[in-house]
Structure formats: C-alpha cells, structure tokens
Image (spheres, helix red, strand yellow):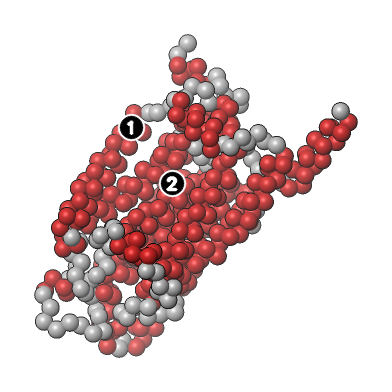
Amino acid sequence: MKNHEKKLQIFNSEKEKDLLSHLINTSLKYKMWIALLAFIILVGTYAYYRQLRYGLVVTAMRDYTSWGIYISNFVFFVAISLVGSLFSSILKLNKNEWSTPLIRISEIIAVAAIICAAVIIIVDMGRPDRFFYVLKYLRIQSPIIWDVIIISTYLVISVLLLYISILPDLALCRDRLTDIPNWKKKLYKIIAIRWNNHPKQWLMLKKISKILSIAVLPVAFAIHTVTSWLFATTWRPGWDSTNLGPYFVSGAFMAGAAIIIIAMFFIRNQLNLKTYINEDHFDKMGKLLVLLSLVYLYFNINEYLGPAFKMVGVEGEHITELFVGKYAPMYWFVQIGGLILPIILLIFKPFRKPIPILIISLFVILGAWFKRFLIVIPSLQHPYLPIQGVDESYLHYNPTWEEWAITLSSFAWLLLIITVLIKLFPLIPIEKFETENQIESNILYNENEKSLI
C-alpha cells in the first residue's frame, strides 16, 4: 500500500480528510515557496548586517526624514493585525456564522503581523540594544512606552485567541495523526494539554473565548489610537490632528478585510477548501470591504479637506505636494485606485467573485501601503522649523537598497510565519464550539448518568 493512501486511512470522515491532509502531505510547491521566502530573508539579513556594522548612514534617513519606510511598514503591519479583532471579536460576538471558516485565518494573520510590527520598530532604532533602554528608562508620559505596552498586550491576547480556538483541533491532531514526524506528535501532545472533549472543558473554553473576544476589541482600538499619538505629538504638517485616531482605525479595518480576501483566495485554491470557503464568503467579504472603505473615505475627506480649505504656510506646501507635486501620482493612485474605484466596482455582484475581488483587494493593499508611506515621508520633509544650510540629501528621501531589502524581508517573514502556522495547525475548525446551553445540558446528563451507576 502506498504511503499516501496509508495516511488517508487515519481520517474518520471526509471533513477530517479535507481539513487535515495538508498537515501531512508536503508538496514540491510548498518547498519552493519556503525556499523563495528564505532567500528573500537571507538577502534582508545581509542588508541588516550592513546596517548594524555601518549604522543608519546606509539608509536614506536624515535629520529631516528621520522615519523612513521602516515606520511605514510598522504602521502597515499594525493596521493589518487589526483583522484579528474584526473577526475574533466584532463578527464573532455578532454571531455571524458565515465568518466561522475565516476566524482562524484572521487570527493567524494578526499574530504574524503584530510580531513583524514589533521587530521592524527595533530595526528602525539602528541599534537593537536601545530597545532595552526604552524598558529600563521608561517614561509613562511618552506615547512610545504606551505603544510598547499596548503592542505587547495585543500580541498576548491575539496568541491566546488563536490558541483557544485551535485547542480542540490540536487534540484531534494528537489522536488522529499517526504518520507524522515524532517532533510533531510531541508538539501536538504538549500543546493539546490533556484536552479530551469533556463538556466542562468546552464550557470553560467557551467562557474564556468570550472574555478574550471582548477584551481584544478595546485593545485593538487602543493600539491604533496610541500609534496615532506618536504622529500627533510630533510637530509636523498633516499630523497635528485629532482625526488621526479614528482615521488609523478605519484604515486598518479596510486593509485587514482586503488581506483576508487575498488569503482566502490562495488558501482556498492551494489547500482545496472550496467546499468550506465558497463564493458566498467572497460576496459577503466584498460587501464588508465596501462598508469599511466608505468609512475610511469619510475620514480621508475629513483629513485633507480642512488643510486644503486653509492652505496656510507649511500645511499648504504639504497639501500642494500631495495634490499636484512630486507625490501626486502616488496620492491619487491611493485615493482612486485603492479606495474610490474598489468601492464603485464592489457594489456590483460580478466583481465580488473570487478572481475580480482578489485583483481589487491587491489594489487596496497596495494603496494601503502607499498610504502609510504618504503619511510618514512627505510630512517629515516639511518641518515647521527647517534647518538652515542643510545638505541636499536632507531635502529628499529615496530609500536605499538596504532599506528595500529589509522591507521585503519583513514581508517575507510575515508570509513565512503565516505559512508555517497553516502547515502546523488545522485552518478551519473541525471540532465546533457548542452553545452554552448544550454544554450545560451535557454536563447535567453526564452527572445524572454517574449518579445512576
């Protein structure tokens, strides 16, 4: 009997076979994908070695543009991490049953994104040992330490949410998957923590899940609000705004919805999950993306129209550079290609089919990254108190190859973490949560059975 056929015999149902097969079988395509990501990470590691050896002088960052694409990446990673709370909290608590197959995908993306956000901010410091000074000499008056606290909190809650949702399926992997490497067997055995599907375990899991789903929401809103404070407390045009908090939150929800659609498409095709992630999911996600994009469009209008009415001083120079200056092509691509056109197209059902909505979501994500670039770079190039007689390099910012290599490496790390987690754990729930009433009934039934015996 072939080894592949032998592996398939361990499954008790067609559903288990569909949802667990990818944990056993490793295709050549998967190995090539890992090799590609590893190569990009290797190049980025060399670039980071050069940055550590020679200092931040290898980057294009100077006294004017002291934040570059590293901070753009940080804000972007923080933004897409919000997708975890969108699905694990808002949609889950509202009992949107259609979103169930997407919850674990969103939680995996959230964990990977917030890890990459934390790492890229250390890369931006130049010397990684300085991060420990932030903790050692913390000042609660500074929004930086608030950001460290809230990111750490969000990471812990996101990991717990993922772990809680996956725990019953980990026990299933422990019991069902026999033809896997020993290290994987030990892993499932350890992290399944003696789960045996007892009704009392389910009841406890249900309560913990509900608490975490509620707790993650204010933390998720706080992480984007605190990040906006880092900008709002820095005296630069475009940042001195009370609009930044909700502006960041709404943009994060939109980017998070788009990244889920992209993940859905590739996971659905590569893992043969068309039965579980169907066209109805794409249709509903398209409608959700339209709603979130409309909210973000409102905050975009609110953000730029106020300064545009006044056109005063440096604020006016900043707006002019965005609207008709050197950043105008990027700005209008973000507004039209990454926001307005997706809204118009997704109103029509044919564009909510898998392939059209994938292309639209790619434009949304590309626009979302360019948007973070535009939030950071142009504002820094227009200080209220410019330095006299500066070198020409201070007035422009063109990222060096080291910055681009580290940036691409950070995205490769994001994809690698997601890929590894997908390879290790079931992606769609197999053991489904019961309602609390069902669980309590099962507990009473079991206790009555014991008393009769």
Farthest residue to the right: give it: 452
Q: Name the secondary structure under disc 1.
A: helix
Q: Where is residue 265 in the image (x, y as percent from the top left)?
A: 44, 44
437 left or right of 67?
right
Mark 1 or mark 2: name the one nearer the start of the chain: 1
Q: Which quadrant would residue 275 be assigned to in this image?
A: top right
- Amino acid type at circle 1 is Lys
Q: Position of residue 255 (x, y in %)?
A: 43, 59
Q: Name the secondary structure under disc 2.
A: helix
Q: How many residues crowd mark 1 within 10 Å: few (<14), some (14–19), many (20+)?
A: few
Distance Cα–Cα, label 1 vs label 2: 19 Å
Residue 279 appears in the figure:
yes
What residue is disc 2 on?
A: 263
Q: Where is residue 199 in the image (x, y as percent from the top left)?
A: 72, 39
Q: Which quadrant would residue 235 be assigned to in this image?
A: bottom left
109 left or right of 434?
left
- Amino acid type at circle 2 is Ala
Answer whether labels 1 and 2 touch (C-beta < 8 Å).
no
Image quadrant where one finds the C terminus: top right
Residue 16 shows which numbered tag?
none
As rendered, which of 290 and 191 lies closer to the eye? Answer: 191
